[in-house]
Image (cartoon, rainbow, N blue to C red):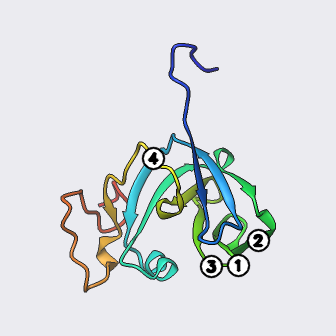
Amino acid sequence: MTNPHDPPRRTLAGRCGCGAVHYTVPDAFAYAANCHCANCRRATGSAFKPFGGILRGQFQVTQGEDQLMRYGKPEGHDARCKVCGSLLYSIVRDGEYVHVALGSLTDAPTLRPTAHIFTGSKAPWYTIGDGLPQHVGHEGAD
């Protein structure tokens, strides 16, 4: 039950590059980080993947569900637009959470990445210089 004195939650919008797939998610990420694991680097083609984590039931594809290409299993996969290839989100943690690719948001989330994770496998050509905590694996597992 929500407290009537709490401010209303903002809803964030996101989409792929071509506009075939749109989604919404509450501005209530449980955590956010920059992941440097080899899988995230390959999925993004970049040095790391900035993402926000939220319970799966809070994420909703609002347009273009039939335009999604999923790589992996129902309880753990990456989802891309099959038209333009944009990485939109990943289903993780045994299907319980969605890691929203922050670059696919059209609105700015309140929570920004708070750490770098899996720096033990980061791209050797990239230097982290933002002062955020760095973790060799998952945050808190070091």
On residue 85, which mark appears?
3
Rendering quarter of residue 3: top right
Alpha-carbon span between mark 4 and mark 2: 25 Å
At mark 2, the secondary structure is: helix
The amino acid type, in three-letter code, at marker 4 is: Pro
Rendering quarter of residue 38: bottom left
| Mark nearer the N terminus (4 vs 2) | 2
Which residue does the image show at 29% across and 61% down from the upper left?
Answer: 142
Q: Position of residue 47 (x, y in %)?
A: 36, 78
Disc 1, disc 2: CB below 8 Å?
yes
Q: Compared with residue 75, is residue 126 higher up or lower down, i.e. above or below? A: below
Residue with the mark numbered 4: 109
Residue with the mark numbered 1: 83
On residue 67, which mark appears?
2
At mark 1, the secondary structure is: loop
Q: Position of residue 22 (x, y in %)?
A: 67, 58
Q: Mark 1 packing: few (<14 Cα in 10 Å), some, or many (20+)?
A: some
Residue lying at the far top in this picture: please name it: 5
